[in-house]
Amino acid sequence: MKFVAYLRSLAAKFFHRSETADDMEEELRSHIQHRADDLERSGMDRSEAERRARIEFGGYEKFREESHEALGGNFIETLLQDVRFSLRLLRKSPGFTLVAVLTLALGIGANAVVFSIMNALIVRPVNVPEARSLYAIERGKDQAINHSYPDYVDLRDRNRSFEGIAAYNVASAGLDTGNNPSSVWLMEVTGNYFDMLKIRPYLGRFFHGSDEHGDNSAPYIVLTYGYWHSHFQDDRGVVGRVVQLNKHPFTILGVAPPDFQGTLLFLGPDIWVPLVNQEQVEGVNLLNARSSRGILMVMGHLKTGVTPAQAVADLNSVGSYLEKTYPEDDGNMTFSLTRPYLAGDWLGGPMREFLAGLMLLAGLILLAACANLGSLFAARAADRSREVALRLALGSSRRRILRQVFTEAVLISLIGGTVGLLGSLLLLRGLSTWRPLPSAAPTMHLPVSTDANMYIFALLLSLASGFLFGAVPVRQILRTNPYEVVKAGLSGRVGRGMTVRDLLLVAQIAICTVLVTSSMVAMRGMMRSMHSNFGFEPQNAMLVSTALNMAGYDGDSVPAMQKRMIDALRAVPGVQSVGSVDRPPLYFGANYTIVFTDKTTDIRPSNAAAESVMYNISPEYFDAARTAFLAGRPFSWHDDQNAPLVAVVNREFAAKVFGSIKNAVGGYYKKRDGSRIQVVGVVEDGKYASLTEDPQPATFLPFMQSPASQTREHLFSVVLVVRSARDPQQLDAAIKSTLQGLDAGLPFSSQMWGKQLNDSAMFAARVATLALGVLGVIGAMLSITGIFGMAAYSVSKRLRELGIRVALGAQRTEVLQAALGRAVKLLAFGSVAGLILGLLATRVLAFIVYQATPRDPLVLGGVVLTMLLLGLVATWIPAQRALSVDPLILLREE
């Protein structure tokens, strides 16, 4: 019954607001009138009786407010009153409002952007049915994602935990649809790929396992929706059309749905083709080579009720079978599961760590913004102490005042969050259309998009931020003594001890210094890495990449064409040397092989002497790459298939396999197939797979003895290194003319080696440096606003004191010290604390940015100089105001 009565009173409150208010006023007045009547009957004058009755009654407004609360429904009404009052206060202080909104917009916007990227790449699964049960299979202790095709077949047929297992690989090919032949990125997939993923075609049909009947038995193509839209103009008659893929006829079967771009989030293909046609697509058939790990990824859906741990145990039992059955090819065949969307843990692990660190730094930005606003709110509460005291004296409750303060804080945070969200939406729209590697990987993109999670995250951040910095002046309000404040008047004083505002400012400056330090460490590391020793010199060298299989070359014609290209380019005016390599160092990883000592007779992976990076090169490659020889000789054109097998190794290989450089030259080692190779030279160590890697063994083989087209496990069959001091544009034009003269149908691309390094090995470091640089700029901006707010507040509260000092003959330096000394000390404390934290935190950058070290003197000096300049900029206006104090005007105002 009480609840029903409450609902009735609540309904009357909203639907009969004026009547309820009139009745409330009438009842309160009747209490006073009745008491006045009693006093008048006792002989008191009427006016005196009414005055006495009002005194006895107490605070009229207080009782009216309590009566409204008792009636119910008062919360929304008072909330609207608080919102209107807060808006009036913000309009009266446009400078404070602008600074607060922009500060929060920076903090919340930065967090929204980082969260959206993390949500797209880590949290939200790829757009396929039942994505939660889709797992990729990793191999060995190193969690390698690549497998051999025979191993995939065994895993597919012998496991009991997956509904189905499919495999795919990434490659490029030349596609001729009848006009304008072009290069396309494609995925070679097993016949059950689309069935396993439970994808339905948008147009036509997909190929299936039943379409495969051996090598090169399924010349079919499935187009992505985007490629069909851009290259075929949505022509529904494309189904059944025969096109040329690397000059082989392929039939277009269908078009994938618009929302399916494959299972790699960052790299979408143009087309899909069956993996059994690998020889036609890549010019090499590795489907029967168990030792060749040419399959990029193997993945499948777990059966209902099967846990990942159970699946791993099942796969390991298959691995044990493979180790026993194929000991020379399959060693350490243990497995683990991971999500396939970021190429397993190869990219997923570093990406998760980097985004987690970026999210932490973005959180520090928001924390610094809240500390900044908390300091400003505490200052505003001190300035409004007389107003608060008068409201308390008139009967307002402290809870009511605190509610109004929190309403103002949350209102500011919601406005700032809205502005930050709008800015983040614009930035995310730009990121979604960004193609980071337009030449190396034109289909690579960042699949960011907005969804409900982002809006909810921004809303929660806004509310949390409002309550966080709104809570700073709570203690100040709760301890307000109305009598003392009113008696003290308008004169302000600045305490000598450390206040909450001081601590917040120190924390904010420390956080901002961490951000500035991190950004400078990253930038300094990038600058040093551009001039490091990679084991080759990218300056004045151009890379010319081509896939000879796209032009119809195969077998013995491949090395012959390579030699023709080298000879032709060597004759170009201004060219100093030309060499070829199957895959340039630091180009998205490296190719590996295991090697054995010459004395090893049991050729199995567990007995390997080393795992080595492997390159197939031409005789003049070392000269073109400017790789220094330590001992022995380079290759010659006589090192062909009719000559004994030879190799050049690096210093690390010589030390690990032979014990020394001296023992290596002339010595022999064995490959997996048991063949003996003689080492004829030793070169310096270099960087091969990653800039941050430790020295690792490397072996170089003459391509005339092992043509690149027959060992292809990378994206380009041939990369020519052309060294010349000639203008790059003129050199590019000369190279183009020369190669087209050899074969007009030969597809190729050219790029300066330094630019190629920026797009591959240094790409992650560049992105990290850019992101940290942006965060550093935001941190610097927050430092300026925080120091400026503190300095301006200190000067405004001490204007009368400063005027007296000037009147008594104080010098300009003394006035500045009195006005800004506290702010400068807090800046120094915060900068030192932040620098120490930054030096500790930025050690992580050494794993992302090559040669990034926080102990670099230039970094330390740069951080100190930056914080000093930020302090000067932030205190310039308050300093000018302090120096322009006129004591006569100030004393006259008092």
Image (spheres, rainbow, N blue to C red):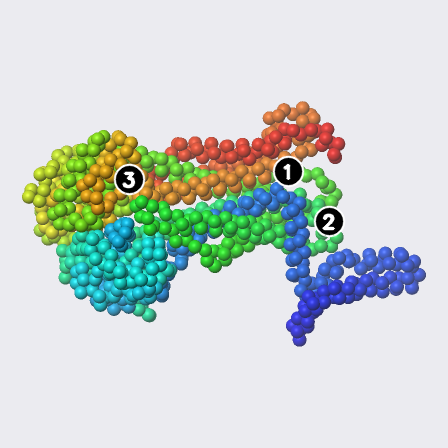
In the rendered structure, the answer to whether residue 479 lies left or right of residue 40 reads: left
Residue 751, labelled with which disc? 3
Q: Is residue 721 above or below residue 599?
A: above
Measuring 28% from the left and 64% from the top, which residue is drawn there? 206
Position of residue 170 measured from the top left corner of the image (x, y, whole percent): 26, 54
- Camera-nearest residue between 864 and 780: 780
Contact? badges 3 and 1 (CB < 8 Å): no
Q: Which residue is mark 2?
A: 390
Position of residue 189 measured from the top left corner of the image (x, y, whole percent): 25, 59
Disc 3 and disc 1: Cα gap in Å? 64 Å
Looking at numbered disc 1 in the image, what kind of residue is underneath it? Answer: Val
Measuring 20% from the left and 55% from the top, which residue is drawn there? 248
Position of residue 339 measured from the top left corner of the image (x, y, whole percent): 33, 58
- Secondary structure at badge 2 equals helix
Looking at numbered disc 2 in the image, what kind of residue is underneath it? Answer: Leu
- Secondary structure at badge 3 equals strand
